[in-house]
């Protein structure tokens, strides 16, 4: 196994930078650059030098033994000053050592997977944690990184292996009398796992929205104040506002944190009949994005006026320009700020209700594996209902369900998806 190294902290000037070395020659690297043998798990202040550059820096060296590090290999971490030139000098010195090479993106984490320090779902949780922008995303990523999905998959696996064992008893002794009817226990195991897997798959859809961010579309007629509202909620001039109707002709997106939820606000073109071809394209795009959005805020100037679009469940209806408009209903003013806190409360309340349905699975890959397992378990249950003659077919379906669940944590061959997963990591991870 080659020994690899990379900068683990962000590039650019900082107080401290950490360079990680992993592999069988990690200790040799420390010795060559510091002239010391450092004890594992003991922070040691060392003078770092090489023959070409002389004294490079003075920093803290931490080493970890094989089996006791993030990667499962011998690891050394150089904690040095974060100046651009200092970090570059140390990286160059390491690159000149013939037994080291620069790590590929995600290679440290891949080695952790290969050495069973993490399962595949935990690897995805780590990537999600690094990308987390909000508190809810962070908590969701931590559940995955802590192994919650792997624990569930292992429990489901044990139950299904028990069911298979019971089924195979009836197959192996088909011509003999089996003293106990195993059908009730097998049925209970299959139904129990199937129902939990189905709930997890359903919750994965919600978890994907939490990870990717909810979309909230602001809709209404031209000049009703959609762009002004977007700017007020975003706290900056993200959209052009004008007295001229039809100023917004494309969908404008603003990403923001609403009470811990990642939300993308969509400012859409004003909905009306128009002969302007370009404006018409914008209106059609607005309708399409609004249809696909998780939530819609419908802005009206008169609550009693008819809606220029079909209302959906969960839509929030607000009367705009309450500072100059006395129309009845839930009034807001993007100019004075009146009603905006209540609007945010209503938006987050609706999204939090939906987010409550999130489970441990958070990725499309998880959902597809869970849905496949559910399908195999339903087929197995159907085979059992047909009688003992098709017990072998039921056992085959249960085995297929186990394989689908094993793919969640990388227990079976998932080489074809690893490249995509690790490509999202930086070099030092």
Image (cartoon, helix red, strand yellow):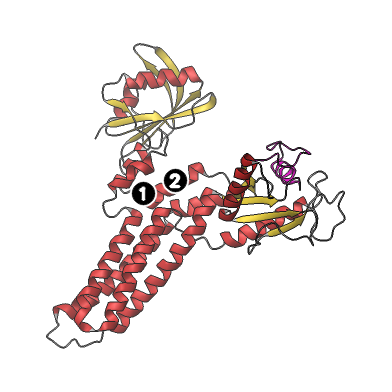
Secondary element type, mark 1: loop
Residue 293: x %, y % from top left: 58, 53
**What is the spatial separation of the Cα atoms under label 1 and label 2, in whole angstroms?**
10 Å
Against 26, is 187 above or below? below
* Disc on the earlier residue, 1 or 2: 1
Q: Which residue occupies the foreground of this view, 381 or 46?
A: 381
* Secondary structure mostly seen in the magenta stretch: loop
Q: Is residue 416 visible?
A: yes
- Tell whether 79 sits left or right of 418: right
Mark 1 vs mark 2, foreground winner is 2
The answer to whether the residue labelled 1 contacts the one labelled 2, judged by CB atoms less than 8 Å apart, is: yes
User: Residue 294 bears which disc, if any?
Assistant: none
Against 426, is 261 above or below? below
Q: Quarter holding the C terminus?
A: top left
Residue 49: x %, y % from top left: 39, 17
- Tell whether 101 sits left or right of 324: left
Q: Is residue 259 visible?
A: no
- Tell whether 170 sits left or right of 22: left
Residue picked out by circle 1: 118
Q: Residue furthest front?
A: 275
Label 1 environment density (alpha carbons within 10 Å; few <14, some 14–19, many ≥20): many
Q: Is residue 225 magenta?
A: yes
Q: Residue furthest left?
A: 175
Count of numbered circles on the image:
2
Magenta stretch bounds: 223-249
Q: Is residue 386 magenta?
A: no
Q: Quarter holding the N terminus?
A: top left
Residue picked out by circle 2: 126
Label 2 environment density (alpha carbons within 10 Å; few <14, some 14–19, many ≥20): many
């Amino acid at each position: 196994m080659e020994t690899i190294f990379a900068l683990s902290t962000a590039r650019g000037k900082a107080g401290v930078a950490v360079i990680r070395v992993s592999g069988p020659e990690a200790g040799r690297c420390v010795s060559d650059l510091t002239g010391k043998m450092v004890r594992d798990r003991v922070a040691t202040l060392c003078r770092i030098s090489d023959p070409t550059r002389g004294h490079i820096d003075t920093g803290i060296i931490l080493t970890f033994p094989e089996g006791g590090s993030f990667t499962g290999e011998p690891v050394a971490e150089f904690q040095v000053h974060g100046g651009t030139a200092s970090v570059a000098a140390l990286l160059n010195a390491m690159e000149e050592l013939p037994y080291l090479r620069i790590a590929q993106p995600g290679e440290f984490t891949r080695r952790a997977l290969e050495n069973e320090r993490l399962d595949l779902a935990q690897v995805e949780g780590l990537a999600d944690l690094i990308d987390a922008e909000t508190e809810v995303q962070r908590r969701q990523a931590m559940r995955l990184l802590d192994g919650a999905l792997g624990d569930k998959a292992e429990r489901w696996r044990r139950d299904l292996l028990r069911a298979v064992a019971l089924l195979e008893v009836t197959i192996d002794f088909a011509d003999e009398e089996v003293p106990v009817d195993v059908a009730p226990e097998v049925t209970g195991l299959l139904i129990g796992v199937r129902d939990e897997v189905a709930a997890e798959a359903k919750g994965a859809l919600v978890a994907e929205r939490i990870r990717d961010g909810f979309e909230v579309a602001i809709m209404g007629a031209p000049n009703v104040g959609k762009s002004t509202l977007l700017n007020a909620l975003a706290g900056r001039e993200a959209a052009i506002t004008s007295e001229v109707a039809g100023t917004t002709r494309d969908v404008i997106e603003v990403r923001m944190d609403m009470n811990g939820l990642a939300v993308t606000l969509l400012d859409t073109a004003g909905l009306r009949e128009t002969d302007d071809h370009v404006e018409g394209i914008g209106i059609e795009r607005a309708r399409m994005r609004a249809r696909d959005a998780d939530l819609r805020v419908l802005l009206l100037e008169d609550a009693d006026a008819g809606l220029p679009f079909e209302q959906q469940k969960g839509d929030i209806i607000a009367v705009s320009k309450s500072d100059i408009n006395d129309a009845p209903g839930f009034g807001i003013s993007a100019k004075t700020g009146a009603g905006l806190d209540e609007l945010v409360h209503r938006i987050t309340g609706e999204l939090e209700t939906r987010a409550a349905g999130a489970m441990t699975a958070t990725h499309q890959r998880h959902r597809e594996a869970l849905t496949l397992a559910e399908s195999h378990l339903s087929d197995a249950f159907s085979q059992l209902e047909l009688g003992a003659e098709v017990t072998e077919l039921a056992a085959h379906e249960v085995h297929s369900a186990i394989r689908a669940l094993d793919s969640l944590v990388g227990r079976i061959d998932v080489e074809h998806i690893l490249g995509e997963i690790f490509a999202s990591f930086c070099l030092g991870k």
